[in-house]
Image (cartoon, rainbow, N blue to C red):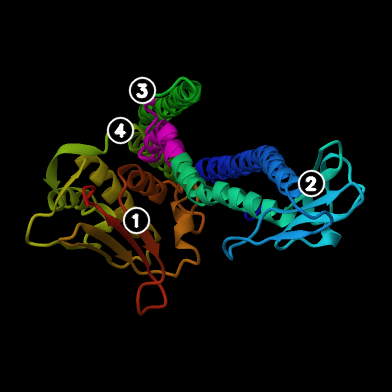
Amino acid sequence: MWFWPNSIKVRTALILSVLVTILWLGAAGITARILSNEMGNVFDAALQETGQRILQLAVIEVLGRDEDGNSQLVTALDSGPEFFTYMVRDDLGQVLLSSQNAVATQFPQGLPMGFSTLAQARLYQEAAVSGSIILTIAEPLAHRRTVAGEVALALSLPLLLVIPLSIVGISYGLGFGLGPLGQLQGQLAQREIGDLASLQTDDLPRELQPIAMTANQLFARLKTAFDAERSFASNAAHELRTPLAGAVAQVQRLRQLTQEPETMRRADQIEVTLKRLTRLSERLIQLARAEGAQLIAASPSDMRIILRWVAEDFSRGSDMGRLRMDLPDQAVLSTLDPDAVGIVARNLFENALRHGDGGQVRVHLGLDGWLGVENVGPAVADPAALAVRFMRMGGLGSGLGLAIVRTVADRAGIAMTLTSPLAGQTGGFCALIQLRADT
């Protein structure tokens, strides 16, 4: 549901808060009900006791009169509210004595002895002198309702403070109780890409230990599978080097021994294919190293020196003079492993040289550690797709060069962007990567 929060802590706090609120309100309602019944008994006892005292005084008053049949009105001493009104009659219904605000219609005759309830009042009736003097005393029900409402209000007002405090306490308690869950989440969130080390389970409560142990088992299985995959790729590439080199030598020897044009053409094709397989095996070794090796060195190195070394390898043969190096005069230090920098540079240089239009490739390194490699050529519709493994441009290459660079960038936590065309141009391709792993 759209309104249901996507958080265990918030959900639990809401549910507990609602339950606590319901329990508090229920307890307050039950307490108010019990108090109302108890107050009714107290009011009845007070009504009865007051009536009996008034009846005693009324008997003395009536019996001490000089004349019979006179009705006497008792005036209140103050003007405050009169909660009890009474009327004293004889056995014939003649009013002998009444309170100031007593109205005869409010004291119907024929009521049973004891308590009775009318629409607006609670009455108590008792007789004396062999039933010749009858007292009826009444208390308005509105008075009892007012007192009951005040009691209910007195019980409810503290809830306005208790319920919010309960919600705050529940939230705080849940935050403290779910702290280990947050620690486990922190361990997982702070892990770098490719980090398959086991989680710390010593300080976790027993409810979370099975989860952490299951995650550790999964990490162990993944690490075993990845190690096996990298080992296979690396070992296979190493094992292929020697037979591929031997096959290239044999093809070159065959081309020297034959004079048939068709055989020479086929030998050239075979040599090209074998050299492509050789480069593929080298790329597989680089990929295995990028995925499994330590990419952060103990001490920083000057990136300019590494880039010059790699550029010298491309300064011979058909690519001579095509790399235009633009390096700063000051040292550009980085803790990125020099071998990883060499792998990145070699793949970027080769990719730019191979897929350009045959012109120069510009290599520029800034003091901020950004390395840019630009070549001139047709624009690429989706540059980022070229960093996917085995995604080739125009059917050339293995599709691993930029994928290897992307793997190094992801594992080292450095930024990499691919753009095409170049700024202000209709074509060209630029690969930018931040070589400072500590920034």
Residue 345, percent from left and from top: 27, 50
Q: Are marks 3 and 1 in contact (CB under 8 Å)?
A: no
- Residue that appears at 74% across and 59% down: 72
Amino acid residing under circle 4: Ala
Label whose residue precedes the other's in the sequence (3 or 2): 2
Question: Is residue 182 inside the magenta stretch?
Answer: yes
Does residue 196 show up magenta in the picture?
A: yes
- Few, some or many residues within 10 Å of mark 2 (<14, 14–19, 20+): many
The type of residue carrying mark 1 is: Met
In this orientation, which residue lies closer to the viewer: 169 or 131? 131
User: In terms of secondary structure, where does tag 3 sit?
Assistant: loop
- Residue drawn at point x = 90 percent, y = 46 percent: 91
Which residue matches tag 1? 416
Question: Circle 2 is placed at which residue position?
Answer: 135
Res. 309 in view: yes
Mark number displayed over residue 350:
none
Determine which quarter of the picture holds residue 94: bottom right
Identified at 23% across, 59% down, the residue is: 370
Label 2 to label 4, Cα distance in Å? Answer: 106 Å
The amino acid sitting under disc 3 is Asp
- Residue 107 lies left or right of residue 261; in this view the side is right
**Disc 4 packing (10 Å; few <14; some 14–19; many ≥20):** some
Read off the magenta span.
172-200
- The residue at which mark 3 appears reads as 203
Label 4 close to label 3 by CB (< 8 Å): no
Q: Is residue 100 left or right of residue 365?
A: right
Work out whether mark 4 precedes mark 1 in sequence or the reverse, and give the earlier one. 4
Residue 424: percent from the left, percent from the top? 35, 80
> What residue is pinned by disc 4?
293
